[in-house]
């Protein structure tokens, strides 16, 4: 059974930073295509950042230069380093994996507010 478990969300002031983690079981991240999505209240879930099995990364324009996705194969984990957070980054962030089918984590709340 595949499980994706996110952690690292919380409340942060504008301009602050957070690091999200996603650890997996039942699936090997280094051969899967991994991504972080987010969903704000009243909005559709959107792709934030992705990392494919060979390591290429991609980002939505609104987070380029502020967010960094990375993968630790030894820990079977991916991370999302988020800097210069803004109120519009407030959302539930989800870990996503695709290997023959799609898998989702339960989400972690990120709130950016003064």
Image: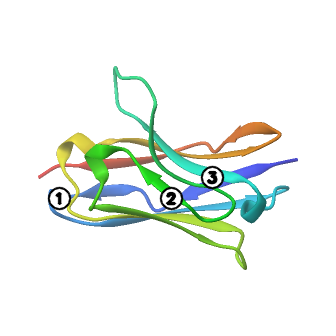
| Frontmost residue, 70 versus 54 | 54
Left or right placement of residue 75 versus residue 91 in this view: right
Residue lying at 35% horizontally and 65% vertically, measured from the top left: 18
Q: Which residue is mark 1?
A: 13
Relative image position of residue 30 (x, y in whole percent): 73, 65
Q: Earlier in the sequence, mark 2 or mark 1?
A: 1
**Mark 3 surroundings: few (<14), some (14-19) or many (≥20) residues within 10 A:** many
Q: Secondary structure at mark 1?
A: loop
Whether 72 is drawn above or below 48: the answer is below
Q: Which mark is residue 34?
A: 3
Tag in front: 2 or 1: 2
Residue lying at 85% horizontally and 56% vertically, measured from the top left: 26
* Quarter-of-image position of residue 46: top left
- Label 3 to label 2: alpha-carbon separation: 10 Å
Q: Which residue is mark 2?
A: 57
| Frontmost residue, 86 versus 72 | 72
* Quarter-of-image position of residue 39: top left
């Amino acid at each position: 059974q595949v499980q994706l478990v996110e952690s690292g969300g919380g409340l942060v002031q504008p301009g602050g930073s957070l690091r999200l983690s996603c650890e997996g079981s039942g699936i090997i991240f280094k051969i899967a295509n991994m991504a972080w999505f987010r969903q704000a209240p009243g909005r559709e879930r959107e792709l934030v950042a992705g990392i494919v099995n060979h390591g290429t990364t991609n980002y939505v324009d609104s987070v380029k230069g502020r967010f960094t996705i990375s993968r630790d194969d030894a820990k079977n984990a991916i991370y999302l380093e988020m800097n210069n957070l803004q109120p519009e980054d407030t959302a539930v962030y989800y870990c996503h994996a695709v290997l023959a089918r799609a898998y989702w984590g339960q989400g972690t709340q990120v709130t950016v507010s003064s």
